[in-house]
């Protein structure tokens, strides 16, 4: 199961904010917030977008 903490770690390592991720990928900050708060889990299509954006493997979000 992908964790928000892994996403946040990758995001921080790349030096971008959730707002910048939204602007660049179209994934709403509310979606990221829901993920952070455990309201929802990211779908595969969103993980693919994030993996491509950060130039990492989807598996990086699953470790």
Image (cartoon, rainbow, N blue to C red):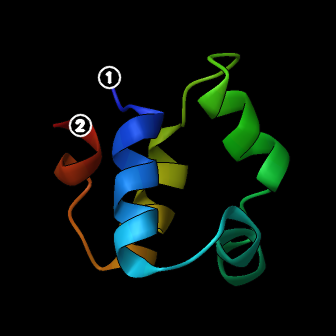
Is label 1 in contact with label 2 (beta carbons under 8 Å)?
yes
Q: Position of residue 60 (x, y in %)?
A: 20, 52
Residue at left offset 62%, top offset 31%: 35
Answer left or right for 28 relative to 1.
right
Residue 48 sits in quarter: bottom left
Q: Is residue 62 above or below residue 56?
A: above
Answer left or right for 7 relative to 34.
left
- For disc 2, the neighbor class at 10 Å (few under 14, some 14 to 19, many from 20) is few
Residue at left offset 56%, top offset 77%: 16
Q: How many marks?
A: 2
Element at badge 2? helix
Label 1 sits on residue: 1
Answer left or right for 6 relative to 11.
left
Marks 1 and 2, how far apart at CA? 6 Å
Residue 62, disc: 2
Q: Is residue 52 above or below residue 62?
A: below
Mark earlier in primary sequence (1, 2): 1
Residue 34 sits in quarter: top right
**Quadrant, the C terminus:** top left
Q: Position of residue 30 (x, y in %)?
A: 83, 44
**Quadrant, the N terminus:** top left
Element at badge 1? loop
Residue 38 sits in quarter: top right
Q: Is residue 47 above or below residue 13?
A: above
Q: Is residue 56 above or below residue 46?
A: below
Q: Position of residue 18 (x, y in %)?
A: 68, 63
Residue at left offset 51%, top offset 51%: 45
């Amino acid at each position: 199961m992908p964790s928000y903490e892994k996403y946040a770690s990758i995001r921080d390592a790349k030096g971008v904010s959730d707002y910048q991720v939204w602007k660049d990928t179209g994934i709403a900050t509310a979606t990221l917030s829901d993920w952070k708060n455990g309201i929802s889990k990211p779908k595969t299509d969103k993980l693919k977008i994030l993996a491509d954006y950060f130039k990492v493997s989807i598996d990086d979000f699953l470790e």
